[in-house]
Amino acid sequence: MTAIVLYVLAPGLLEFLGDAPRLLSIDFVWFPVVVGLEAASFAALWGLHHVALGTSDRVLVATSQLAANAFSRIVPGGAAAAGALQFRMLVQGGIAPATAATGLAAVGLITIGALLALPLLSVPAVLAGAPAPGGLWQAALIGAGAFVVLFALALAVMSGDGVLRWIARAIQMVRRRPDGDGVTDDPAEGLLGQRDQVRAALGRGWRLAVASAVGNRLLDFLALLAALRAVGAEPRPSLVLLAYVAATVLGMIPITPGGLGFVEAGLVATLRLAGVAGADAVLAALAYRLVSYWLPLPAGAIAYSVHRRRMAAMRGPT
């Protein structure tokens, strides 16, 4: 599936990447700003992991997240593969498996919720100014609706037992063989126990968790705005925010690694809807993807190497 999709997207992707030499023409005064904002976005995400996992080992959190992030961008179905890698690295670093699993699940839920909430920030600005183009307005409404659904689901899971018990019954039905035999243990208790661990961890630092999740997304968005400023484009930030959300959601499609091809095409198209000239949209998207997609790849490799060295040092000579 990945090969087929990349084959279909290849002409547009190669044309997009073919404009890379034009990056030399942008105002490079803004390049350190883009890099700094993207680095701060990663640091905010580490803060969220720190709260959700309840660990003081910030090096473990940073290296596992960087390595998993890079891994997700080089393999198909990257989110699942990255989650498995990060889980393994956290357990190797001394995090209890149940804590690692529930903490990563909480991080995923909170970060997706923060992303889907961003369009709500644009709605008042759009209503107060010129109307948004149809495509971006639809993205805002879809994002707002998805956020409401996700928030309601998260509230139900965190405040009551009914949803988790229903999920547990569904799991039990799947695990039971047609002949009636199979696993008979009740998964509800395990789900409830893990939920309570996440709630206890976030209960002590939920404000930091929310601020970190929102900061992660907003700093990444500001990196895109800085890239636009670097090419001389000055569109309305409220429309760029809708374009950013739409393109980021495209990046979650688990077919190509890191949404490769989908994000490039979607970001350029949505930036043009936001009023950015075609050439500027391509150049800004190139600068943004260079910092947000390509530079973290070697950073992830370095982080994984640091993690292995730390684990070897903790085990000591054999």
Image: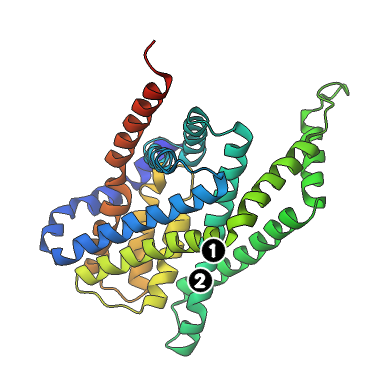
**Residue, x 25% and y 48% (percent of image)?**
14
**Residue, x 46% and y 83% (percent of image)?**
125
Q: Is residue 44 above or below residue 192?
A: below
Image quarter (top left, top right, bottom left or bottom right) of the C terminus: top left
Percent position of residue 74, x then y: 36, 37
Task: Tell me the amino acid under the disc marked 2.
Answer: Pro
Task: Tell me the amino acid under the disc marked 1.
Answer: Leu
Percent position of residue 265, x then y: 35, 57
Q: How far apart are marks 1 and 2 (CA)?
A: 7 Å
- In the structure shown, which secondary structural element does the residue marked by tag 1 occupy? helix
**Residue, x 37% and y 45% (percent of image)?**
8
* Cβ atoms at labels 1 and 2 below 8 Å apart: yes
Instruction: Return the residue at label 1.
Output: 116
Percent position of residue 15, x then y: 23, 52
Determine which quarter of the picture holds residue 61.
top left
Say which of 178 and 184 sits in front: 184
Crowd around label 1: few <14 · some 14–19 · many ≥20 (10 Å): many
Q: Which residue appears farthest toward the top when viewing the image?
A: 318
Instruction: Return the residue at label 2.
Output: 119
